[in-house]
Every structure is written in structure tokens, then in C-alpha cells.
Amino acid sequence: MQYRYMGRTGLQLSVLSYGSWVTFHKQIEDNSADRLMGMAYDAGINFFDNAEAYAGGESELMMGRVLKQKNWERSSYVVSSKAYFGLRGPENKPNQAGLSRKHLFEACHDALRRLQLDYLDLYFCHRPDPNVPMEEIVWTMHQLIQQGKILYWGTSQWSGAEIMEAHKVAQQYKLIGPAMEQPQYNMFERFRMEQDYLPVFRTVGLGTTIWSPLAAGFLTGKYLNGMPEGSRLSYSNFGWLKDRWLQEEKIAKLRKLMELAADLGVSLPTLAIAWTVVNPHVTTAILGASKAEQLEENLKAMDVLPVLTPEVMQRIDEILQNKPRLDLA
């Protein structure tokens, strides 16, 4: 396993990490979560990602039970949570969602209770909230750090302009600004990491904990012949994922990527994950495997990194019909 500093902080995260979105409580139960987190930890993974909205809080409860049972040294792992959506979706009452000081404060305490932790290493604003002044958001996250409830705060799915606005507020009031962003990034979802965030990387710095490096499983190739039972896209409440990925044009590109992976003697999932972490602005790529064999395969992405020569990267861009990555230095 390799480790990278998270942006301009002193925190080091494993280049591959493990997350619980959809997986925990939806696809797997405690015994499987215990095994998968143990496998990840033994492989050198030190970051475990979660959020209040994942399975309505059940994901954090499950991870908390596993962490307590494992009894690992607290200094050896990093845990995150995120706030915005609340626990109840459309049934949220006023102040039970969003980025108000009230919700961020209460959601943080609820996450600590569910995860059975004294503090969160990383705490994300899960989406931007145009209804809350940026000053209120930045002040609240700064105060949570001062109170010892969180160590670093960040954003998820924010635009580069919104992140820079948060830094402007932080500089104005001499507060701690966001240290990391959690965007979607994979072969088919590239704009923010490769274009929108470049000014942020170059000016204030930004760590990234990217999600969906396999495009919700699409880049495994398992959906080419139907919808496997129990797969992520088979859940009715994730229909938006089907609409995004199961398109003829993307499927045609997927077949060509599978052929390239075969030519290189690697699996498509490992190729796709390795492709994301070749980007030096990626601090860590979050894996969401629901089975031991999937996690074992995904972890092999570290061995695929030497295969991704400039020539191979160019072939991938030609298949995707995308411009090469901009200067990422």
C-alpha cells in the first residue's frame, strides 16, 4: 500500500480506502462488514468512509460495531462522516437536513454516537447548501475542530468556485478552511478533478477522497449481460445510476476498455481504479466492494500502476474520445 498526504495537511491516507455507501446494511451485514474491513486494514488501508445518510444511519452503526470489536489502535485508522441529507430523506423536518449550524452540530454528535468514536478524523459537507450563508458553514466547521469533535473538514460535490468561496471566508475571519473534497471521479466522470478544481489545487491546495472509481460497478463489466441480483444498480432507489451508466455509447466504450485490459493482461476493475490514482491530485480512491473476492481483486490495482504508461493512457483517452488530462502538475 502507498500513502499520500491529504492536500496540504500532515495527514496521510492510504491510496486505496474502503467505504460503506450502499454496501453496509443494504448488501452486507455485520459479519461480512467485519471480514471486509479486516481485509482492508490488513492490506494497509487506513481510511474508512461513511455518512449520516448511508442506509439512514445504519451504515455508521454497523461500522461502529465493527470498529469496537476490532479494537484497533485509534491512531492507526481514519474515519469520516458527512452531513447534509439527514436520516429520513423526504420525511426530514425543518433543520434535520442541510448545512445549518444546528444540523451540522447535531449530525456530528449523532455520527460520533453511531460510530462509537470520540472524534471524527474527517467531516464533510455532503453537498453545497445555497440556503445557508457560507460564513455560518465555515464558522461551524471551525468550531467543531476547536471543540475536538473533528480534525479536518471538507466538502463533497462542491464546485471549485464554492470551495474557493469557503477559503475566502476562512481567510477573512482567520478560520480553518476546507482541507479536502470528495468528488466522483472515474473514466467517465472527469470534469471536476481534471478541470474545475485545478485552480484550487494550485492556490490553496486540496486533498481528494474520490468516490465511485468503478462508476457504481459499471467499470467492472458485470452489467453487460443483464442486471445481477443484489448488485448496486439492481436496487430500485438507485435508478439514477442506471440512467447515468447504462447507455449504448458508454457500453460500446466499455467493451473497448475490456479489450484493452485483456491485451494488458489485467482486469478491467484494477485498470479503472489504477487509472484514477495515477492522477497525483487523488489522495485516495474509495473502494466499495461487497464481497471478499471483489475486494481482493480491487486491491490489485496497486500492482497495475506500472502498466499505465503514457502510451496506455493515450489509448484509454482515444477509447473514451476524451481530451487527455490537462497539466496536473
Image: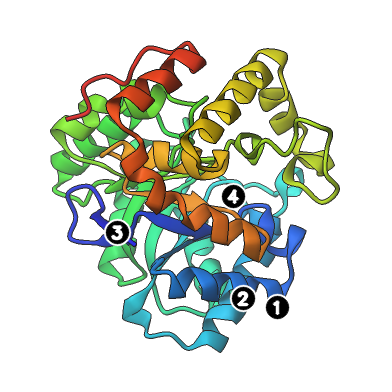
Q: How crowded is mark 4: few (under 14 residues within 10 Å), some or many (20 or more)?
A: some
Residue 206 position within the rendered picture, expressed as x and y whole percent measured from the top left: 25, 42
Q: In this view, does 110 lie above or below 125?
A: below
Q: Which of marks 2 and 3 is nearer the N terminus?
A: 3
Q: What residue type is labelled 1?
A: Asn
Q: Which of marks 4 and 3 is nearer the N terminus?
A: 3
- Looking at the rendered image, the disc whose residue lies closer to the viewer, 3 or 1, is 3
Q: Nearer the viewer, residue 97 or 232?
A: 232
Q: Residue 223 carries which label?
A: none
Q: Which amino acid does label 3 sit on?
A: Gln
Q: How crowded is mark 1: few (under 14 residues within 10 Å), some or many (20 or more)?
A: few
Q: Are marks 2 and 3 in contact (CB under 8 Å)?
A: no
Q: In which quarter of the image is residue 279?
A: top left
Q: What residue type is labelled 2?
A: Arg
- Looking at the rendered image, the disc whose residue lies closer to the viewer, 1 or 4, is 1
| Residue indicated by mark 4 | 95
| Residue indicated by mark 2 | 35
In the rendered image, the quadrant that contains the N terminus is bottom left
| Residue indicated by mark 3 | 2
